[in-house]
Image (tube, rainbow, N blue to C red):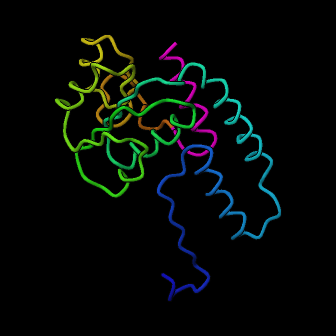
Amino acid sequence: MIEKNAKTKHLHFDTISGLLKADAFYKALIEIKELSKPNPTIVRWRKRLQDALLDTHFALGGTQTIIAAEPDQILSLATTISEAGAKIKAVVSPTKSKALEKVACENIIIGDFEDVERELKEADLLISNFHGERLCHEQHKALLVRGFPNYEQVGNNLKNDTLYEGGCYLLFEVANLIK
């Protein structure tokens, strides 16, 4: 690619979720474009995310959360909700990945829903695909459905949890589940 166009730049971001990671992403884009400041829409959404972090901190602060998903999605979701004060009690991934090394969680499990069921007993919230519904129903825990499969919500795969705007929506959705 670089041979075809010497001006091509490769940028790598482990995630673009959460305030700090989105800041790094936008900063890099602004530098590449040699702009003095970001677009006003971006500034407005950043301020909204700051407000969302403050508003949801009271609901999410200390919430014991388990995330069962693919590694990249785990990192993305954990980054955002951790900034609002949620505690990542455990993550359960079906595969190993370097992305899991960046998740702020000491209990990283390569496993399946049997592992989720065991960990869920001491948690408040599960973020997983539809297969977590039965476990949450049995243990009276909150469930945020993300990932595939999802048999009950049309369009769930189109939800945006990234950058400033998506982070706002994610935080509000989680806070409304916990209240």
Q: Which residues are magenta?
A: 160-179
Provide residue 21's location: percent of width, then percent of height. Answer: 58, 51
In front of the other: 132 or 123: 123
Question: Main SS type for the magenta part?
Answer: helix
Q: Residue at x 35, y 42 (%)?
A: 106
Image position of 132 (left or right of 58): left
Image position of 109 (left or right of 46): left
Work out whether 162 lies above or below 48.
Answer: below
Work out whether 88 lies above or below 173.
Answer: below
Asked if the magenta segment contains residue 162, the reply would be yes
Provide residue 15's location: percent of width, then percent of height. Answer: 49, 52
Asked if the magenta segment contains residue 6, the reply would be no
Which quarter of the picture shows residue 69? top left
In front of the other: 15 or 65: 65
Q: Residue at x 31, y 20 (%)?
A: 122
Residue lying at the far bottom in this picture: please name it: 3
Work out whether 55 lies above or below 82.
Answer: above
In front of the other: 130 or 89: 89
Provide residue 169's location: percent of width, then percent of height. Answer: 58, 31
Which quarter of the picture shows residue 155? top left
Q: How many numbered callouts?
A: 0
Q: Residue at x 69, y 70 (%)?
A: 32
Provide residue 31's location: percent of width, then percent of height. Answer: 71, 68
